[in-house]
Image (spheres, grey):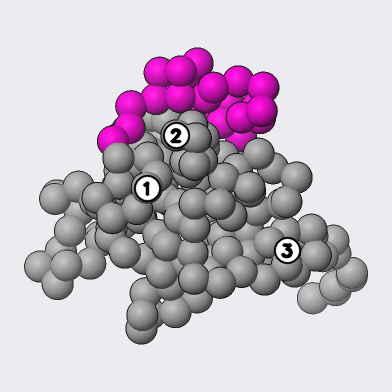
Amino acid sequence: MQKKDACKVSCLQPMPKAIVSCRGKDGRNNALVVGYCGNCSFDPPMVMVGIAPSRFSHHLIKESGCLVINLPGKDFKHEYGVIGSKSGRDIDKFKTLGLKSTDGDVVAAPVLDDCPINMECKVVDSLVTGSHEMFICKVEKVHAPETAIGTDGKIDFSKLDLL
């Protein structure tokens, strides 16, 4: 097998299709698509989310110390596209898209009701890695459809039609 140098940017694949929702101290909700997101500890359950400091949501998360990671279904493709291409500085994505949300049970951030998986997270640390700040978050609560939860309490992702 012949190999050659490849692009180093985002070379680890697949990247999850994830939407982070957050709320500023002023009560304004926002959501953004993130490419850098993953597990980083199982005891305690921790995840990391990378967000560029130039993004509108970055300062909202810095001031609130929490966020929700939402995994959308395939039926959320249009909303995902708009959330990922428009800035919260320019539009209210919740109002424009008619996003349905409820307040988190544990964190002060909106849970996107139409996404099958939602992870309420508290930021415990962060690290600037270059273009992004990695928010290290403790997973406080996970919402998932009852039909996708196995007898062991784990999510059976094969029962979900995620984007």
Whether the magenta-drawn stretch holds residue 89 is answered as yes
Amino acid on which the number 1 mark rests in the picture:
Ala
Could you say which is closer to the camera, residue 147 or residue 87? 87
Callout 2: SS:
loop
Is residue 14 in sight in this rendering? no
Looking at marks 1 and 3 on the same chain, the residue that comes earlier in the sequence is marked by 3
User: Residue pushed farthest left?
Assistant: 151
Q: Disc 2 designates what residue?
A: 27
Q: Position of residue 60 (x, y in %)?
A: 57, 45
**What span is in magenta?**
78-102
Residue occupying the point 37% across, 66% down: 139
Amino acid on which the number 2 mark rests in the picture:
Gly
Q: In the rendering, which numbered label is found on residue 108?
A: 1
Could you say which is closer to the camera, residue 149 or residue 86? 86
Residue occupying the point 56% across, 60% down: 49
User: Residue pushed farthest bottom?
Assistant: 43
Could you say which is closer to the camera, residue 87 or residue 150? 87
Callout 1: SS:
loop
Q: Quadrant of residue 126?
A: bottom right
Asked if residue 27 is positioned above or below residue 19 in the image, the reply reads above
User: Residue pushed farthest right?
Assistant: 5
- The reply to whether dot 3 and dot 2 touch (C-beta < 8 Å) is no
Asked if residue 33 is positioned above or below residue 79 in the image, the reply reads below
Q: Is residue 126 left or right of residue 40?
A: right
Q: Disc 3 designates what residue?
A: 11
Amino acid on which the number 3 mark rests in the picture:
Cys
Work out which quarter of the rendered image holds the N terminus and state it.
Answer: bottom right
Residue occupying the point 68% across, 61% down: 133
What is the C-alpha distance between the residues marked 3 and 2? 37 Å
Residue occupying the point 59% across, 55% down: 62
